[in-house]
Image: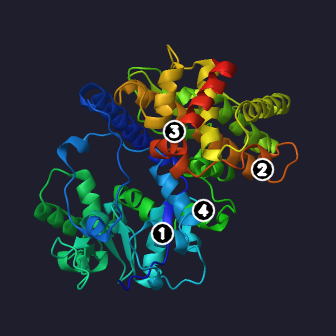
Amino acid sequence: MGVNINKICFDGALPVSKRKIRFSRIEKLRHRLELARRNLPLPATPKCRDVIPTKRERVWCSRGLPQRRKGLPENPFMVSAVFEDLRTRWTKEQIRKDVDYDVSCLVVDTDYAWAAITVMVPGEADVECARVAKLTGCAVLTDDSDLLLHDLGDNGAVLFLDSVQTSSGVWNPADPDIRGLRICPHSLSGRLGIPSVQWFGYELQKNHHLRFAELTRLAKESSEATEISSEYLEFLQEYQPEGTDNEVIRGAGQSAQPMDPRVSELFWQYELPGIYSSGEQPHVYLGILNEDSSRRCAWEQGRTYRSLGYSFFNISRPAANQFATVREFVRRGGRIVAEEITLSGTKTVTSDLDLLRRRLAHAHATFDEGLAPESFWVLYALSDIYRDGAGTTTVPSAKELESFLTKGYMAQSTKWADIHLLAQMQAALYSLRILKQLFDIAAPGDDLVESSSLLADLPPLHILMSRQKMIQSFANTRLARNAVRQLIETYG
């Protein structure tokens, strides 16, 4: 289509000033989960979603989200999975195989079409996107209108993601005309008669109930004042590329490790504490799992792995840069709380590492050799649930577990018990992923950790978090039955 992609940016950390917004967003997601648990009708007949088609006519054509889907909780692993896939999954061959797409237009020399331009920004992605737009005159594809308030230069623009579609609403291969709403802040401010769109944004923040024309009038008056107010200067700080914090962030560069966004944010709280922790203990926002909100939070599963990862990373830092605790923001009942995890010292970390090795060795000895990694890790997560029973009143029977592995549900159709069991597995597996990445960035190649042999074959997120992939890996009923027998005999 003749589109050149300069860079694909992801938030690597958010500043302390955004913590209240983060908390309110998580609370909204918790409330949405609560409403879904109360009101969402589950299918009365067996149903497992087919693979979503990726044909271009489905991707580019306009369509509204059905009302029954609008209240569904978000996927807490979406951003992490997309970042990982862009860097490590989408080779030209994989694109040709999985997507209805002619890869001949990908002129890059490397096999991974987007790996080199996909970055986890040490900070907010907005600032880097604005810098690239100003430098190249490109449009930033996003759904965040705040980017209009950054300095995008004379030609830089914002193209809103939800507006991109075919001009006619129907895909025509002979005339693949894709359009979207593109706004150039420099041109817009000229049409409004104000020096910059930032004046309009400032008035909108103060008077969000006013009409467009009235906001424009106020923006003109404010911009023509003899003195610029201190409130306006404070408002501008977030959008100034030459700000002290942004200079420090750019000077810090990128971590050499392609980290998960949540690991990245923890990393930068240690690297640049003045910007990302401001003297407080590090914060970790785990997100809201798709779980049964009437039960204990599924993130309780895997907490020991996350604690080990946080502790190991902490003791790898200089003494002056260590913390006593990490605060995890998770659901507890009907509210979001900051649960403090006390970080362990070297002796306890070494002991916990030995325990992890023994548990993994036991699991490998329990389940048949030759089992695919995705199957092994599913069983390992289930063994965790059977071993400690965190958040479960009763563990599934052998028959229920076999049905869950082969069909995705334990009874005749999907129930909230199935959804919660999957969430517990996801929590355990994602916690192991956090642990692995913290091992790698704290002490790559360290003999004490031996992370390459411990957790190296953890599958990528698009496999690790997928119910469909689990069902596919246990399509052989005999394999599933044998695995369940071994699991219950050992851990039940």
Which of 466/294 is in front?
A: 466
Disc 1 secondary structure class: helix
Which tag, 4 or 2, sits closer to the chain's start? Answer: 4
The quarter of the rendered structure image containing the N terminus is bottom left
253 left or right, relative to 198? right
Q: Position of residue 266 (x, y in %)?
A: 62, 46
**Circles 4 and 2: CB distance less than 8 Å?**
no
Q: For mark 4, what is the residue?
A: 249
- Identify the amino acid type marked 3: Leu
**Residue 286: assigned label:** 3
The amino acid sitting under disc 4 is Ile
Of labels 1 and 4, earlier in sequence is 1
- Tell me what residue is drawn at x 20 percent, y 52 percent: 207
Q: Position of residue 90 (x, y in %)?
A: 53, 67
Quadrant, the C terminus: top right
Badge 1 crowding class, 10 Å Cα cut-off, few under 14, some 14 to 19, many 20 or more, is few
Looking at the rendered image, the disc whose residue lies closer to the viewer, 1 or 4, is 1
What residue lies at 67% left-to-right and 34% top-to-bottom?
A: 305
Disc 2/disc 1 C-alpha distance (Å): 30 Å
Which residue is the site of mark 2?
Answer: 452
- Mark 3 secondary-structure assignment: loop
